Amino acid sequence: MISTNESKVTILTPWMEVIGPFVELVVQDGVLLAEIAKHIVVLPLELKDGLTPHLGHRITILRTDIQGKEYLIRILADDKQDLPTLEDTSRNTVNLCKNGHLPNRCEVIG
């Protein structure tokens, strides 16, 4: 069970982001509590189904002021070997021009 030590509880405001290991997820007092990067982040209950499969991964959650996309969630590469190099990024930019998309380096939810 997540300990809700007041100094660690974070309610994201627009354009705040939390990044790090996604350790635990619980429903408590009508909200979703996610332990990410040693912080307890308060989230809406409707994110539970989208987040649950990603426990144990590194994630980032960005709160926005965009209607219908208030929370943008990305699943990050688990180790640095999976991250693109500068050369890969340049090549991917060229590929973007040719075929309209970049190869997957992370998964986006939301």
Image: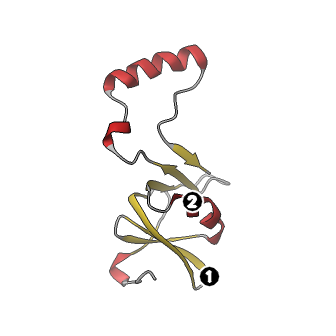
Q: Amino acid at mark 2?
A: Pro
Badge 2, how many Cα within 10 Å: few under 14, some, many 20+? few
Seen at 57% across and 59% down, the residue is: 53
Seen at 54% across and 16% down, the residue is: 97
Q: Find disc 1 in the rendering and name its residue.
A: 30
Spot occupied by residue 104 in the image (x, y as percentages of width and height): 52, 34
Element assignment for label 1:
loop
Q: Find disc 2 in the rendering and name its residue.
A: 53
Q: Nearer the viewer, residue 69 or 73?
A: 73
Q: Nearer the viewer, residue 13 or 95?
A: 95
Seen at 57% across and 64% down, the residue is: 52
Element assignment for label 2:
helix
Q: Nearer the viewer, residue 41 or 107?
A: 107
Choose the circle earlier in sequence order: 2 or 1.
1
Q: Where on the picture, by quarter, is residue 2? A: bottom left
70 to 106, vertically: above or below: below
